[in-house]
Image (tube, coloured by chain):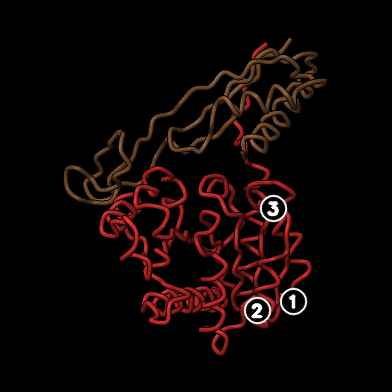
Amino acid sequence: MEIEVMKDILGENDTVASENAAFFAAKKIFVLNIMGSPGSGKTTLLERTLELLADKLRIGVIEGDLFTAKDAARIEKHGAPVVQINTAGGCHLNAAMIRKALGKMDTDNLDVIIIENVGNLVCPAEFNLGETAKAVVLSVTEGEDKPMKYPLMFKEAAAAVINKTDLLPYVNFDRAAAEHDIAVLNPGINIFGASCTAVEKDDGIEAWCMWIEENYRKVSENFSARQE
Amino acid sequence: MHETALAEGILRIATDAAANNNAARITEVGLIIGQMSGVETEALEFAFRFLAKGTLADGAQLVIERKPLVARCDRCGRQTHLSEYNFFCPECGGVLKIISGREMQVAYVEAD
């Protein structure tokens, strides 16, 4: 016999993601899911972001990693509350992992939660976590062809950070081509340049932080609007 | 790599459907996978074959229907099949919104 089913394969994850999203909305927390290749500079970007926003927003961090707590240790040094999720080899975070991590966070005293996903340009894009927005970090050492090779992640993201711009003189990276490809893949996406370790800081990182602040404001204002 | 997670989802949906219909054995599971979904078919089949061992779906075949990427312009309303990932309307320069091609669904289960 043929049994009609028509169910989403990731339906269970999507259900938990919606519950997470409702939780974040009720708590007025802006939740940003940062994705990108291993070594693209996600943790360093996060550290710079925490430094720049420390006086303005109360930021909590959820760190996804295959096995280690190395990134969480780096974040802790900045004084931000951090929860480590070890996926034990799993290539992405899922919504249930986030729900579990939330139990270990003081969510009543947070404005923003930044989730650093497992380093991977493919899998994390398929798994909604209930986040308010996704962002992707692409470093110039990876090559400008990556957006079109891994389109889904760039399609899903509300912001893209082109990282390590201080290395542009030394690598074959066509920044204009990369920005063009990202923009045609995802019209309206916010693109920022960043160099997180160079002495001469890229202005893009301040624009990136302002984008986070704006998004937090939107989340809290939407909430107020609903309450009226 | 996430094909294992997908295979787990497929197996759960398929065996639930079979059990609800008092079926003893699943022979085939029909999937709809969009062109812009990050699914590697061979890895998915391998993971499914492995996970299905000892379940109702032991030995079942995955039959995959690929859905092309189709988008509609938010300005002129024109529908376009996309072969390249350019989401600006070729006619008017408006923004194309995806209407199909992102699916990952279990469509049907064939069971005895």
Q: Which chain is red?
A: A
Residue A226 in which image quadrant: bottom right
Which one is in front, A212 or A202? A202
Residue at mark 3: A66
- Nearer to us of marks 1 and 3 is 3
- The correct choice, above or below, for A15 with respect to A29 in the image is above
- Nearer to us of marks 3 and 2 is 3
Amino acid type at circle 3 is: Leu
Residue at mark 1: A106
Q: Position of residue A85 (x, y in %)?
A: 72, 59
Q: Say which element carries label 3.
A: loop
Looking at the image, is mark 1 or mark 3 earlier in the sequence? 3
Seen at 46% across and 52% down, the residue is A156
The CA distance from mark 1 to mark 3 is 24 Å
Seen at 76% across and 17% down, the residue is B58
The reply, left or right, for residue B48 in relation to residue A55 is right
Q: Position of residue A44 (x, y in %)?
A: 54, 71
- The correct choice, above or below, for A112 with respect to A157 in the image is below
Circle 2 marks a residue in which chain? A
Amino acid type at circle 2 is: Leu
Which one is in front, A18 or B67? B67
Which one is in front, A114 or B28? A114
Amino acid type at circle 1 is: Asp
Q: Colour of chain B?
A: brown
Q: Say which element carries label 2.
A: loop
Residue projecting furthest to the bottom: A55
Residue projecting furthest to the left: B91
Q: Position of residue A207 (x, y in %)?
A: 39, 77
Looking at the image, is mark 3 or mark 2 earlier in the sequence? 3
- The correct choice, above or below, for B41 with respect to B73 in the image is above
